[in-house]
Every structure is written in structure tokens, then in C-alpha cells.
């Protein structure tokens, strides 16, 4: 009997963590949609497999959404910009459900440039501060995007 009870706990715990992470991801997605809702122009990079869109208002970047689908899962980044085109935060959702890229996992990270901190979703649905190089890494990535976006096409 203990084996069966332990087996149920092993199934319920990952399911609970998945639901919490998905909820946090949905929260970040809704925040992004609200943030870009006043955009007056959307441009994209014409890549059908890994689409990127930039949302502009009065010619200034309000947000960028980058989506990738590696063979092991899905990867989405949402960049939030202030009215002065300063990066405020990046919400990153990595859902690697196939073991072809190594270990499977589902994680959500928020790189908060205003507070200069990086947070990860936890099983409890709360943010947990983490220390790594994501803040610096995203600063370099966004510098490349700023230049590249000017060559993207208007989304029809």
C-alpha cells in the first residue's frame, strides 16, 4: 500500500508544479498583452518557424515577443519597454518537454531591470530571487534587437 500512496504523491507533485508554473506564465503573458495593448504598429521578422514581433507606439518600441520551437519544446521571451524605450523587464518561459535537449523542465524567469534582479517561478507560485548572468545577457541581446527591428516588416 505504501508504494501506491508514494506513487500518487510522485504524480501529484509534478502536476502541481506544472500548474503553478503555467499559472505564472499565463500571468506574465496577460501582463505583456496589457502592456502592448496601446501599440499602433506591429512589425515582424518574417521567420515562420521562430517568429519575433515588435510592438510600437508612435515609432517607439513598447514590447518584443520572441518565440522559438526547438526540437525539445517551446521557448518564449517577452520584452517590456517604458515609454522612453528603456527595458523594464523580460519574461522568459522555457518548456522543454522532450529529453532530446537534456533534462525536461518547465520554468518561468523574470529579469527585472528596474530592480536589477532575476526571479524564477517556484512551486508555490511565488517569485524566488536567483543569482545568475541573465541580467547582463539580456542587456546584450536587446541591443542587437534594437538595430534589427528597424528592418522588420509591418505585420498584415
Image (cartoon, grey):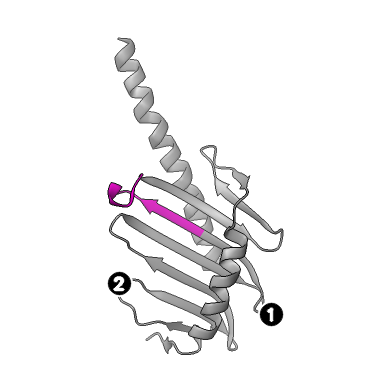
Q: Position of residue 116 (x, y in %)?
A: 69, 59
Residue 105 figure quarter:
top left
Q: Residue furthest right?
A: 115
- What is the C-alpha distance between the residues marked 2 and 1? 31 Å
Q: Is residue 36 visible?
A: no
Mark 2, secondary structure of its residue: loop
- Name the residue nearer the viewer: 154 or 40: 154
* SS at mark 1 in the image: loop
Q: Locate residue 132, reporting x and y percent.
A: 59, 52
Does residue 100 belong to the magenta stretch? yes
Q: Earlier in the sequence, mark 2 or mark 1?
A: 2
Q: Quadrant of residue 134?
A: bottom right
What count of labels does the image hold? 2
Compared to 90, does 11 lie above or below?
Answer: above
Q: Is residue 131 left or right of residue 122?
A: right
Q: Residue at x 63, y 49 (%)?
A: 131
Q: Mark 2 vs mark 1: give the one in front.
A: 2
Query: What span is in magenta?
Result: 92-103
Quadrant (top left/top right/bottom left/bottom right) for the C terminus: bottom left
Q: Residue at x 50, y 59 (%)?
A: 92
User: Can the viewer see residue 113?
Assistant: yes
Residue 107 vertical placement versus 67 (above, below): above
Instruction: Please report the residue visible at 50 percent of the width from the left and 52 percent of the height from the top.
Output: 108
Whether 139 is among the magenta residues is no
User: Horizontal placement of 131 versus 3: left or right?
Assistant: right
Query: Residue 83, percent across and down?
Result: 67, 78
Residue 122 in which image quadrant? top right
Q: Which residue is mark 1?
A: 84
Numbered label attached to residue 49: 2
Whether tag 2 and tag 1 are in contact, CB under 8 A, the answer is no
Amino acid at each position: 500500500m505504501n508504494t501506491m500512496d508514494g506513487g500518487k504523491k510522485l504524480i501529484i507533485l509534478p502536476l502541481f508544479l506544472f500548474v503553478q508554473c503555467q499559472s505564472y506564465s499565463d500571468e506574465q503573458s496577460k501582463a505583456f498583452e496589457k502592456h502592448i495593448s496601446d501599440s499602433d504598429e506591429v512589425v515582424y521578422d518574417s521567420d515562420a518557424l521562430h517568429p519575433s514581433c515588435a510592438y510600437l507606439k508612435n515609432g517607439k518600441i513598447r514590447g518584443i515577443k520572441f518565440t522559438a520551437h526547438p526540437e525539445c519544446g517551446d521557448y518564449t521571451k517577452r520584452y517590456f519597454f517604458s515609454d522612453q524605450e528603456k527595458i523594464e523587464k523580460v519574461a522568459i518561459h522555457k518548456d522543454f518537454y522532450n529529453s532530446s535537449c537534456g533534462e525536461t523542465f518547465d520554468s518561468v524567469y523574470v529579469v527585472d531591470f528596474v530592480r536589477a534582479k532575476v526571479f524564477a517561478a517556484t512551486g508555490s507560485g511565488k517569485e524566488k530571487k536567483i543569482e545568475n548572468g541573465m541580467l547582463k545577457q539580456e542587456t546584450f541581446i536587446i541591443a542587437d534587437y534594437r538595430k534589427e527591428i528597424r528592418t522588420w516588416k509591418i505585420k498584415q
